[in-house]
Amino acid sequence: MSQGAHRAKPDLRWAAAKVLLFVVLALPLGLLAYDLYREIVTPGSVFGPDPESEVVRYLGEWAIRMLMATLAVSPASRLFKRPHWVRFRRMFGLFAFAYVVMHFVGYWGLFWQFDPSAFVNDFVGKRPYITVGMAALVCLIPLAATSTRGWQRRLRRNWRRLHRLVYVIGVLACIHLWWLSKGGYGEAVAYSAILAVLLGERIVHRVRIQRSAR
């Protein structure tokens, strides 16, 4: 078998894995589209009496799930000794960004019909969880924009420094969820605990590297 054939197999597997992951990460959007169709056909059958809130909540839940999944890629690759898993991190991150954007657009469009003044009133002080959520979105924009290999080459070491913003974004997302929670903090506690574990693993990993370098 030629050397080119040996190379083709891993490339084919990588491409197939990327397609499969893309389908899996996009599946919640497909389910939402189907539920929206059912809601249009039979109003109140899927989202209840407050469909706008349910749609925005659904997108927000998947946004934080994608964000936590993005943060989990590196620890999982170390835990299971699969360094190539890190190659999937970009797709997780871009999907997290997409879900956050849709969550924001859904909130602004469904609640305020894209009225800038109404949103500014919320952002300035009426609802602090909106301010924190917007801060997370703003921090995500440069990460999504510089996620390509080209930007990684251009920024060099600064690329890693910039993308450490994802830790700040994780904290902001949890604060957003805490302030948004009403009548129960189970989800906020769960996601905060997950974030603490993921960040704690990184600290332990960094300490081990520093000790081994001595």
Image (cartoon, rainbow, N blue to C red):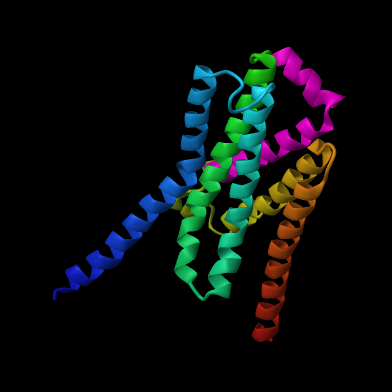
Q: Quadrant of the C terminus?
A: bottom right
Image quarter hosting the N terminus: bottom left
Q: Residue at x 82, y 46 (%)?
A: 185
Out of 19 and 39, give the one closest to the viewer: 39
- Residue 10 is situated, as x and y percent measured from the top left of the image, at 30, 66
Residue 164 in which image quadrant: bottom right
Could you tell me if residue 107 is visible in this image? Answer: yes
* Residue located 75% across and 48% down the image: 187
Q: Main secondary structure of the magenta part?
A: helix
Q: Is residue 1 left or right of residue 185?
A: left
How many numbered circles does the render carry? 0
The answer to which image quadrant residue 209 occupies is bottom right
Residue with the most extreme left position: 1
Image coords of residue 208 (percent x, y)? 68, 80
Q: What span is colored magenta in the figure?
A: 116-144
Residue 180 vs residue 31, the one in the foreground = 31
Residue 154 seen from this side:
no
Which residue is rendered at x = 48% and y = 50% of the image? 91
Residue drawn 45% across and 48% down?
24
Relative to residue 110, is residue 27 depicted above or below?
below
x and y percent of residue 35 in the render?
52, 30
- Answer with left or right where residue 142 lies relative to residue 207: left
